[in-house]
Image (spheres, rainbow, N blue to C red):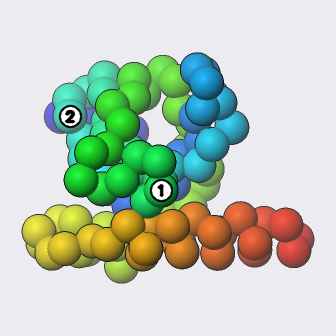
Amino acid sequence: MSSRFELGDLVISTAGRDEGKYYLVVKIVDEDYIQVSDGDKKRIENPKRKNIKHVRPAGYHFGEISIWLLEGKRVRNEDIKKAIKDYQKNEEAK
């Protein structure tokens, strides 16, 4: 599998009803699809399947969450929501 995305990457949806929404990559399905979560509408228990053609990297990687996902540790929806919210707050401050 040679996907351009990694677990813990922040992505932005570029197509569909959720266009412009931030998600966190929680699973690499294959070279064309990933599963993403926002910790709110699309929770970690039921992530959204997205074609990689319909997302773009936001240019940020959540290292700690990535490690949790790789090690099979429990990632809470609150952790994902907080990570995305903190990123957006930092972007607005720039």
Q: Nearer the viewer, residue 20 or 66?
A: 20
**Does the rendering let one see residue 24?**
no
Q: Residues within 10 Å of mark 2 (few under 14, many from 20)?
A: some
Q: Which mark is residue 40?
A: 1
The part of the image, by quadrant, that contains residue 20 is: top right
Q: Secondary structure at mark 1?
A: loop
Side of 67 where 43 appears, left or right: right
Give residue 28's position: percent from left, percent from top: 24, 41
Question: In which quadrant of the rendered view does residue 39 lie?
Answer: bottom left
Q: Quadrant of the N terminus?
A: top left
Residue at the far bottom in the pictured view: 64
- Judge from the rendering whether residue 72 lies leftward or rightward of residue 43; answer left or right: left
Where's the C terminus, which quadrant? bottom right
Q: Residue at x 38, y 67 (%)?
A: 77
Q: Which residue is mark 2?
A: 29
- The answer to whether the residues at label 1 and label 2 have Cβ atoms under 8 Å apart is no
As shown in the figure, which amino acid type bears the numbered disc 2? Val
Q: Residue furthest front?
A: 41
Give the secondary structure at mark 2.
loop
| Disc 1 from disc 2: Cα separation | 21 Å
For the point 71% across and 65% down, the residue is: 88
Choose the circle earlier in sequence order: 1 or 2.
Answer: 2
Position of residue 78 relative to residue 59, above or below, is below
Residue furthest left as drawn: 72
Quadrant in the picture for residue 86: bottom right
